[in-house]
Image: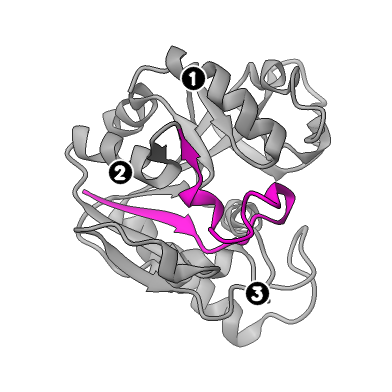
Amino acid sequence: MNAIILAAGKGVRLLPNTKNVPKGMLKLFNETLIERQIKIFHSCNINDITIVTGYRSEVIDIPDVNYVKNENYETTGMNESLFCALKPSNSPILVTYSDIVFEQKIVQQMLEIIDGIRLAVNLNWKKYYQNRTMHPLSEAENVLVENGRILQIRKNISKSLENQQIGEFLGIMMLSSEHVKILLERYSYLKKNHVGAFHNSSSLSNAYITDMLQEIINCGINVNPVFTEGKWCEIDTPEDLKNAEKSINKFQS
């Protein structure tokens, strides 16, 4: 089992905390966000781990992992960072954002069915925004789910049918080896042929992973949710960091 941790971004909204370190290297007590993720991966027998670096890459110095640098991190989006590291694989790949803290049981849930493209989704996501005055609801990466399939993934989604559900994508994604190949083929095609805006981004090079997932959905490929109520939080602002310090003892690692 492989994992990719996306850690190339600068984390502008976390300044001054990220003046000298990428946000994945911020510490909660005596452990960085990335180290915490790796510890959970090892507990779940995920040992082949790649970290995608960019901003202050020299600060990320963790033993027994692989490194890939997005040399264009200042002018490209997270999707570009993913494809810097994504390669054909005989094993499934778990992809995570570096700025999230989560319980081990969320990863265990992701490992229960290793098939297709599956995203960790929380349907009770709004409660996580009760103490987030610096990160509004409108910034959430929402998914629209109908009959067990994700139809849309972007910010500011509203449902139109009673059987539809809206949740938040937690920044944790499982890819089967077959679907890694599908993603690589589609990305290669887009790099050669696509011009202009790309879904909710100004260009393909500036795209978010959610843009690429919407592209795959539009191509008729199923993207499925893994509903979880495991504890999770995103570290996107100084306020988030303070909130995480208060709640981290409630997490089951």
**Can you tell which quarter of the image residue 48 is in?**
bottom left
**Disc 2 and disc 3 in contact, CB within 8 angstroms:** no
Within the magenta stretch, is there residue 3?
Answer: yes
Q: Which mark is residue 48?
A: none
Residue 242 visible in image: yes
The local secondary structure at tag 3 comes to: loop
| Disc on res. 74 | 3
Foreground of the two, 69 or 239 = 239
Left or right: 190 as drawn, with respect to 163: left
Check if mark 1's residue and mark 2's residue have beta carbons within 8 Å.
no
> Which x, y percent locates residue 102?
45, 29
Select label 1 or label 2 by which is in front. 2
> Given the image, on which type of amino acid does mark 2 rest?
Ile
Q: What residue lies at 75% left-to-right and 15% top-to-bottom?
A: 162
153 over 52 or under it: above or below: above
Disc on the earlier residue, 3 or 1? 3
Q: Position of residue 69 (x, y in %)?
A: 43, 74
Q: Residue furthest top?
A: 250
Q: CA distance from mark 1 to mark 2?
A: 17 Å
Q: Residue 146 appears in which quarter of the rendering?
A: top right
Figure check: 217 above or below 125: below
Between the C-alphas of marks 3 and 1, the distance is 31 Å
Q: Which mark is residue 38?
A: 2
Of 62 and 159, nearer the camera is 62
Residue at image location 34% in from the left, 31% down from the top: 107
Name the residue rendered at 69%, 15% in the picture.
Answer: 127
Q: Which residue is mark 1?
A: 231
